[in-house]
Image: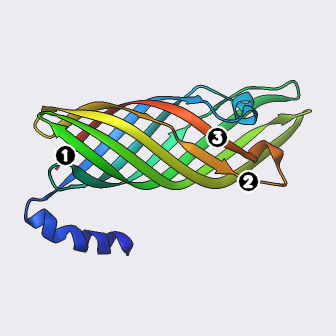
Amino acid sequence: MRVALLALALAPAVARGQAQGFAESYLGATLPLGEKKYDDLVEASFKLGVRGGVWLGNMPRVGFEGSFDFSPLSAQATSFVLNYDAKRIRFLGGIRLGFPFGRVLVYLRVAAGIDYVSYTGLFLGRRISDSNTGVAFDPGVGVMVAVVGPLRLGAQLSFPIGIHHDAQNTVLDYTSTDLDMMFVIGAVF
């Protein structure tokens, strides 16, 4: 329902040619930089995701985005836990501020949303698993280059933060901070 209302609200700007949609996919690495508890638990991992939204105006451009990303977290095994497997899924919504320079667009973005983490493993020979939903905050900067027609290629750096509180499970009671380095391919329409 909210998406339909947003589409109706943006329809006049699209009709006047003042709005431009975008779709992106991204792939890269996520490196843990958070508190010691998180850094001791997780190693560098790959990350992939999709994002879409709309740009409004010309200079500077203001944009709105929604995104989904997935990271199969490479977990560090301890002496008590073997075959440890962890995953993170994020659903985010946010805003962008873009500065076009010919075929190049430099942008700042900030998004917030849901950070879902789950893990499974063996603890003293017994199978364990748990999950936790936390709050995500994701500031970043990126650059996109118009290659041909609607095709865009670029790169993005961001510093996502996940805040998890689980008083009954100390494994998932942490604040994560990562450095994400992404290759981005996208299109405008």
Q: Which residue is mark 1?
A: 188
Pick whichever, 67 or 122, lies toward us.
Answer: 67
Amino acid type assigned to the residue bearing label 2 in the image: His
**Which image quarter: residue 178?**
top right
Q: For mark 1, give the secondary structure.
A: strand
Residue depicted at 16% across the width and 50% down the height: 189
Q: Is residue 97 above or below residue 48?
A: below
Q: Position of residue 38 (x, y in %)?
A: 71, 35
Q: How many marks?
A: 3
Q: Which residue is found at the position 8% from the left and 59% from the top?
A: 17
Image quadrant where one finds the N terminus:
bottom left
For residue 23, the mark is none
Q: Position of residue 60 (x, y in %)?
A: 20, 49
Tell me whether circle 2 and circle 3 mark residues in contact (CB < 8 Å): no
Residue marked by disc 2: 165
User: How far across and down, in percent of the image, does residue 186 sit?
Assistant: 26, 39
> Spatial distance from mark 1 to mark 3, Cα to Cα?
32 Å
SS at mark 3? strand
Residue drawn at (45%, 44%) of the image:
139
Label pair 1/2, CB-CB below 8 angstroms: no
Would residue 53 appear left or right of 38 to someone viewing this image?
left
Closer to us: 93 or 50: 93
Q: Are marks 1 and 3 in contact (CB under 8 Å)?
A: no
Q: Quadrant of residue 177?
A: top right
Q: Is residue 57 left or right of residue 25?
A: left
Identity of the residue furthest to the front in this view: 60
Amino acid of disc 3: Ser
- Disc sitting over residue 176 in the figure: 3
Of badges 1 and 2, nearer the viewer stands 2
Q: Residues within 10 Å of mark 1 (few under 14, many from 20)?
A: some
